[in-house]
């Protein structure tokens, strides 16, 4: 195709590309269990779910008393999905939810007419940018109206949040909502006064009163609120919260790029090799959305500049020119330093990343310390340590060559643990293991050589005895027949 059409083809990647990974399978299983388990205690044909009960529930919620809600004990609670911005939380959730019909029409069930024929299996919506409870409720009612043709929004658009919350709960109960997913929950941080706590408490009420599973999705910025109020609602959930960090440079990262690499519209297609894997990770820091955008931008530049194929240098050039706004965040991740990463709340999890960053900083301090010693004292501390250990091994009776090999191997293996490991003990253990291995190998070879010695000379006594055994003769008889045993009478007389 001509270049101007191929430029449009590249755009398909951002819209259509999806590569299933282990985290997606785990999320799909959690959603599946959550929806099905949540319906266990909510049969619309039971007396507890009849219209009168729903009306009583409405009155109870309006009065702020939910202790007498007449339904079975909730069987499911929900969970929180938090992760770094751009890692694919929302898009993955949407693909999983689209595996289920969003609305099911039930006119009859086992010969009985259903009070509300429309069942809403799932509903996903975004938390308002200002954390407004009223905005969330109105968006919910509007979404329900668009799905089942009701008029909740038109009738209640002027009501205040305290009036809208129970209406939202009632609509969820009437239409047997299977799971409610609230995305961009970090926007609650922008809510005024105690509105964030009020909204999270309302989600707890949805779980406790009508047994509606609630899934909250957001970046790490939402963790302070989620670890407070919403934790009470999730404590009995068997699904467990999900935390999506940026990818590590492992087989899953390679698997993701292998899928992405199929979609090239340049004149020549390049093969994914380790150099491409490294440069893509370095410039995106394992954030899938950035990696996909970087791959697209690189192809656009190649097509625009009439470059035949993409190269690692072209990828770095595009990242340097086009990622100016997110470069500080990427540089912070690349540095591995906690203080820099903490400036970007969307990419920092103060709970689960602290240990990771502490370990990185400890390793960096160890490397820095070794470099200082080498610079100031004029020698390499690893070389000095190796020489000292090899000399100690020679004094302990180890040959020089084996001592040097053992010292080098142990220092190399425990480079970042020089102050915490007994290197002399480890080196001696390694040297003795190598000696035992060599001894056993030599003995085995000698045994094989001995077993292969077969006598061939006719006068060899071993050959005579062996041939006699084949005739069922004893060794004595065999040697006597061959004339090697004389008759004693010859020596008498």
Image: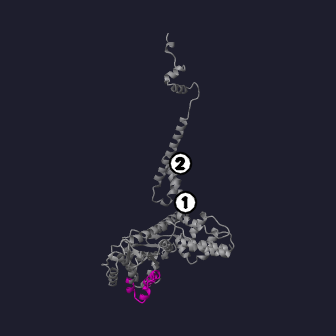
Callout 2: SS: helix
Which of pointers 2 and 1 lies earlier in the amino acid sequence? 1
Residue 334, x across and y down, in percent: 54, 70
Q: Quadrant of residue 352?
A: bottom left
Residue assigned mark 2: 402
Can residue 267 be seen in this snapshot?
Answer: yes
Asked whether 217 falls inside the magenta stretch, the response is no
Q: Which residues are magenta?
A: 137-166
Q: Are marks 2 and 1 in contact (CB under 8 Å)?
A: no
Which residue is farthest top? 493
Q: Is residue 90 above or below residue 396?
A: below
Q: What residue is pinned by disc 1?
A: 380
In this view, 43 is above or below 481: below
Question: Is the stretch drawn in magenta largely helix, strand or loop?
Answer: helix
Report how far apart the C-alphas of labels 2 and 1 lie in the structure. Answer: 22 Å
User: Residue, x 59% and y 27% (percent of image)?
Assistant: 457
Of 24 and 249, the residue lying toward us:
24
User: What crowding class fits label 2: few (fewer than 14 Cα within 10 Å), some (14-19), or many (20 or more)?
Assistant: some
Residue at 53% across, 41% down: 442
């Amino acid at each position: 195709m001509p270049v101007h059409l191929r430029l449009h083809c590249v755009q398909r990647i951002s819209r259509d590309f999806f590569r299933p990974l282990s985290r997606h399978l785990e999320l799909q299983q959690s959603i599946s269990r959550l929806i099905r388990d949540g319906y266990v205690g909510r049969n619309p044909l039971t007396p507890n779910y009849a219209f009168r009960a729903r009306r009583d529930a409405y009155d109870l919620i309006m009065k702020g008393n939910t202790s007498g809600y007449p339904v079975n004990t909730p069987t499911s609670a929900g969970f929180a999905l938090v992760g770094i911005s751009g890692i694919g939380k929302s898009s993955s959730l949407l693909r999983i939810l689209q595996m289920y019909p969003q609305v099911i029409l039930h006119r009859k069930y086992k010969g009985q007419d259903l009070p509300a024929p429309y069942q809403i299996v799932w509903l996903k919506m975004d938390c308002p940018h200002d954390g407004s409870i009223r905005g969330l409720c109105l968006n919910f009612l509007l979404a329900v109206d668009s799905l089942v043709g009701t008029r909740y929004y038109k009738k209640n658009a002027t009501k205040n949040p305290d009036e809208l919350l129970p209406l939202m709960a009632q609509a969820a109960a009437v239409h047997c909502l299977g799971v409610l997913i609230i995305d961009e929950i970090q926007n609650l941080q922008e809510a005024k006064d105690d509105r964030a706590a009020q909204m999270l408490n309302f989600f707890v009420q949805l779980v406790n009163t009508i047994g509606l599973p609630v899934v909250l999705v957001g970046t790490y910025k939402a963790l302070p609120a989620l670890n407070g109020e919403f934790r009470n609602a999730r404590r009995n959930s068997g699904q467990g919260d999900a935390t999506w960090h940026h990818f590590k440079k492992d087989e899953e990262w390679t698997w993701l790029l292998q899928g992405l690499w199929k979609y090239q519209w340049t004149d020549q297609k390049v093969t994914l090799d380790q150099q491409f894997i490294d440069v893509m990770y370095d410039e995106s820091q394992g954030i899938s959305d950035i990696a996909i955008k970087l791959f697209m931008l690189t192809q656009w530049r190649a097509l625009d500049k009439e470059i035949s194929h993409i190269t690692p240098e072209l990828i770095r050039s595009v990242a340097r020119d086009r990622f100016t706004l997110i470069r500080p965040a990427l540089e912070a991740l690349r540095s591995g330093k906690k203080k820099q990463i903490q400036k970007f709340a969307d990419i920092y999890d103060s709970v689960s990343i602290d240990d990771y960053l502490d370990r990185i900083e400890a390793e960096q301090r160890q490397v820095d310390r070794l470099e200082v010693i080498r610079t100031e004292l004029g020698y390499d501390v690893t070389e000095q340590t190796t020489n000292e250990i090899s000399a100690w091994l020679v004094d302990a009776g180890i040959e020089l060559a084996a001592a040097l090999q053992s010292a080098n191997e142990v220092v190399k293996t425990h480079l970042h643990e020089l102050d915490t490991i007994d290197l002399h003990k480890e080196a001696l253990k390694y040297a003795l293991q190598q000696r035992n291995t060599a001894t056993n190998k030599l003995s085995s070879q000698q045994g094989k050589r001995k077993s292969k010695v077969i006598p061939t000379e006719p006068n060899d006594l071993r050959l005579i005895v062996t041939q006699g055994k084949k005739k069922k003769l004893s060794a004595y008889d065999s040697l006597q027949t061959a004339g090697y045993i004389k008759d004693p009478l010859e020596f008498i007389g």
